Image: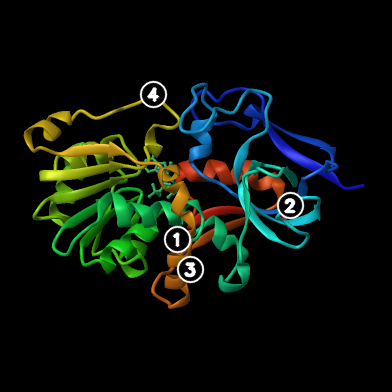
Amino acid sequence: MAVNRRFTLVSRPDGAPRPSDFRLVEEAVPVIGEGECLIRNHYISIDPAIRTWLNQEDTYMPAIAVGDALRASTLGVVEASNHPRLKVGDWVQGLNRIEDYSVCGPDGANGRVDVSRVPSPSAFLSVAGGTGLTAWFAVEEELQPKAGQMLLVSGAAGAVGSIIGQLARGRGARVVGIAGGPAKCARLVERYGYDAAVDYKGKDVDALRAAIAQACPDGVDLLFENVGGICLDAALLNINQGGLVVVCGLISEYNGEPYGTRQLIRLLMHSVAMRGYVLPKYAARLGEGRKALIDLVARGELVYDEHVEEGMENVLPAFMRLFDGSNEGKMVVKLV
Ligand SMILES: NC(=O)c1ccc[n+]([C@@H]2O[C@H](COP(=O)([O-])OP(=O)(O)OC[C@H]3O[C@@H](n4cnc5c(N)ncnc54)[C@H](OP(=O)(O)O)[C@@H]3O)[C@@H](O)[C@H]2O)c1
């Protein structure tokens, strides 16, 4: 008999998540009721944001309660349906529990996607999923980089940063990325359209400040922040008068105490604006962004990479890899 496996939260991680913080439970495959459909999840998107949902505080999403199932973006196929809009065989993308089978009600957060125009359905969790869309609206709306401007991106080799570089370069901006290690830095320039790359590994804030200054000799006009910590401070030490900082993520702080910034004075002295950005701000326009990204990929004008692990048992190891930087592209776990 088929079973439904899902991960639950046993205890809130104190620092880096450990396997003992989670439990894989098995239950019967759910039976659908009136207006519901049963989705077989084929792919699970493994995102740094999941770590922030494990904390006690609600954010732009409710915190995951101890005892509840973990949550992720998923991509699956409808296997049985009493749903008014979703029929058997439809590919659907949604926000579900990390499990083999999910139930979606009439108002559930799952929408049909057309997988015929993408190289693999998993593109709806990568370039045409949350990370690609985060990059799209960052460039189109939040940053709006112009020719002659210098955009600095941290976490640049990640799923969001790898798309940002290409999109911003297409608008004529000069783009410099910060990433960990020579292989990722080479990738930024050779594959993701960055003009130059800065390796943050092994550098203190002064050395990183100097490395950014060398890559951005006229200073930084726009900063897209994915990492925080000393990356943010070193970048702020290079920010230009009237600059803009868009904070998209602070991954270096997700497993520990907040570091914040020691360079707030740069905002004051250089009239710099700094604001947070989360993708749900553009919830009503996701279809528009998805279409634009798929068109760019189809025309060969945008490349993207996925790091696909297989099997439910690899969900936690895949999640841990986001924090040691050993993922090579958007991390996805393939279940089917
Ligand atoms: N605001 C939004 O709506 C939104 C949406 C999606 C993602 N995000 C945020 O964007 C950021 C990047 O996400 P992603 O999906 O692009 O990343 P990703 O593909 O999951 O890759 C994560 C990368 O972060 C880097 N990293 C991990 N720990 C680090 C540390 N302590 N210091 C410096 N770098 C570290 C590693 O790259 P290196 O090897 O280069 O260190 C790692 O490969 C995250 O902060 C995430 O929360 C925000």
Between 173 and 214, the one lying in front of the other is 173
Q: To which residue does mark 4 refer?
A: 257
* Mark closest to the chain's N terminus, 4 or 1: 4
Indicate left or right for 102 with 316 as reference. Answer: right
Residue in the picture at 48% in, 41% down? 48
User: Where does the image place residue 95, in percent across and percent down from the top left?
Assistant: 60, 44
| Inter-mark Cα distance, 3 to 1 | 10 Å
Between 40 and 177, the one lying in front of the other is 40
Q: Which mark is residue 71?
A: none
The amino acid type found where label 1 is placed reads Glu
Q: To which residue does mark 1 refer?
A: 288
Q: To which residue does mark 2 refer?
A: 84
Q: Using the image, determine if residue 123 lies above or below residue 326.
A: below
Secondary element at tag 2: loop
Q: Quadrant of the C terminus?
A: bottom right
* Mark closest to the chain's N terminus, 3 or 4: 4
| Inter-mark Cα distance, 3 to 4 | 38 Å
Secondary element at tag 4: loop
Indicate left or right for 97 with 81 as reference. Answer: left
The amino acid type found where label 2 is placed reads Pro
* 3 vs 2, front mark: 2
* 4 vs 1, front mark: 1
Q: Which mark is residue 294?
A: 3
Find residue 254 and report its image quarter: top left
| Inter-mark Cα distance, 3 to 2 | 27 Å
Residue in the picture at 75% in, 56% down? 78
| Inter-mark Cα distance, 2 to 1 | 24 Å
